[in-house]
Image: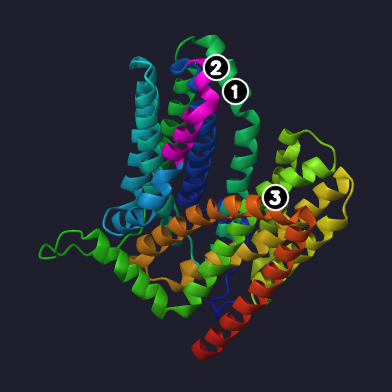
Amino acid sequence: MLPPEPTAVNNGFAALIKNRGFMLLWIGQLISQLADKVFFVLMIALLKLYLPSNEIDGDARFYLYMAFTLPAMLFGSAGGVIVDRVPKKLIMVGSDVVRGLFMILIPFLPRQFGILLFFTFGISTVTQFFAPAEQASIPLLVRKEGLMAANALFSSTMMAALIIGNAVATPMLNWFETFNKGFGKELVVGCLYLISAMIMMPIQFREHRHIDKTAPAINPWAEFVLGLRYLKQNRLVWNAMLQIVTLYCVFAALIELAIGMAARLHLAPEEFSSFVAAAGVGMVIGAAILGHSGHRLHHKPLPLIGFLIMAFSLGLFIFIDNQPLALGLCIFLGVGAAFVNVPMQTLIQQQTPSEMHGKVFGFQNHAINIALTAPLLITTKLVNAFGLSAVLLGMSIAVAAIGMWTWQNTRRVLQDVI
């Protein structure tokens, strides 16, 4: 699947555990991602302190969602431009410190809805700089032959943070509130960000940054165009990114499909999250397989296998009529998703020069943020118009077709490279 790379003496997770810098980065980003998930739950919970109860279910929640999601669409690529110009450690540690201080400051300000929107927008904006810096840091700490295992570990912990964060957010916030009435909830989220910053402080990056004093100031638009031009010229990276974005489109649509599955199985509407969580567990399992045995599987068409697994799972959902089978199928779908995400993320890191990491990963995060929003709205309309079974069948065919098409493109590019 991937172009030939040097053989590692010690592959898999065992080599990563011995890499102190990588382990600090991994633990730091895990705590930071956990804080992100709890932060969103906290913002929704705080609405009752900032607005009358009769206004919470109206436009207020919509405005809060917009304040949380708009920065991802507006500043996703801009964050990548900054990452290529500023030391990555400074960006990650600095963004954690800023988010932590913002959270601690919230309870000391007036309880006005505009202030809550401002801090939600500000913290979400800072997050757009952390994400591409994190992705660009992995190749600086891990040798090329260890990138498959590193990305597998990051993918699995990302899903673990999503599952655990949403599961423990409310109980954890309520528990801390009992110790410190008034600002216990904000304090715990702020401390999570600050702990993440302290953990990453000792990391030493091998960044070779040539400082040209005659270089012009940062022009975000020109840097963005430069990144797009690079992606257009490097078809291998472009195909890999296209597959990752397609994967996130499927996961975004899965949320609406899971709601429909819950209704079909006569479950409570809120129980749809169990299907999404099961897919996350599948991604963790798939990432563990690749992390442990990826060096023996790198020559296999892993993304094609992953897309076919996902297409097969989506098609089988039409015939499922009990919850245990549906959860098992979601786990199987998640394994297929890991087979797409991990090797393609590894390929992007291997094939992208270090001076382009920020721009490429910034553009990738920008595209993923859009991919996580648009399909959710489209799927809702399609399910209402054609029914759940028809949409599942259509998505199954589309995912299989996209997988085969992108694999054929990748094969042609690899033949040109070799």
Reading the image, the residue beneath label 1 is 172
What is the x, y in percent for residue 216? Answer: 14, 63
Residue 349: image tag: none
Mark 1–mark 3 CB contact (< 8 Å): no
Give the amino acid at mark 2: Phe
Judge from the rendering whether residue 352 lies leftward or rightward of residue 342; answer left or right: left
Q: Is residue 148 visible?
A: no
- Badge nearest the viewer, 3 or 2: 3
Three-letter code, disc 3: Asn
Mark 1 or mark 3, earlier in chain: 1
Q: Which residue is mark 2?
A: 176
Disc 2 element? helix
Q: Identify the residue at horizontal 31%, vertical 59% (top origin).
A: 84
Secondary structure category for the residue under label 1: helix
The residue stretch that appears in magenta? 52-68
Q: In this rendering, is residue 225 above or below 269? A: below
Query: Can residue 56 be found in the magenta stretch?
Result: yes
In the picture as drawn, the residue positioned furthest to the left comes out as 214
Q: Residues within 10 Å of mark 1 (few under 14, many from 20)?
A: some
The amino acid sitting under disc 1 is Met
Residue 199, position in %: x, y?
44, 38
For residue 76: magenta? no
What's the CA distance linking mark 3 and mark 2? 41 Å
Residue at (48%, 39%) from the top-left corner? Answer: 32
Front residue (pair 212, 112): 112
Q: Which mark is residue 384?
A: 3
Rate crowding at label 2 as few (under 14), some (14 to 19) or many (20 or more) other CA atoms within 10 Å. Answer: some
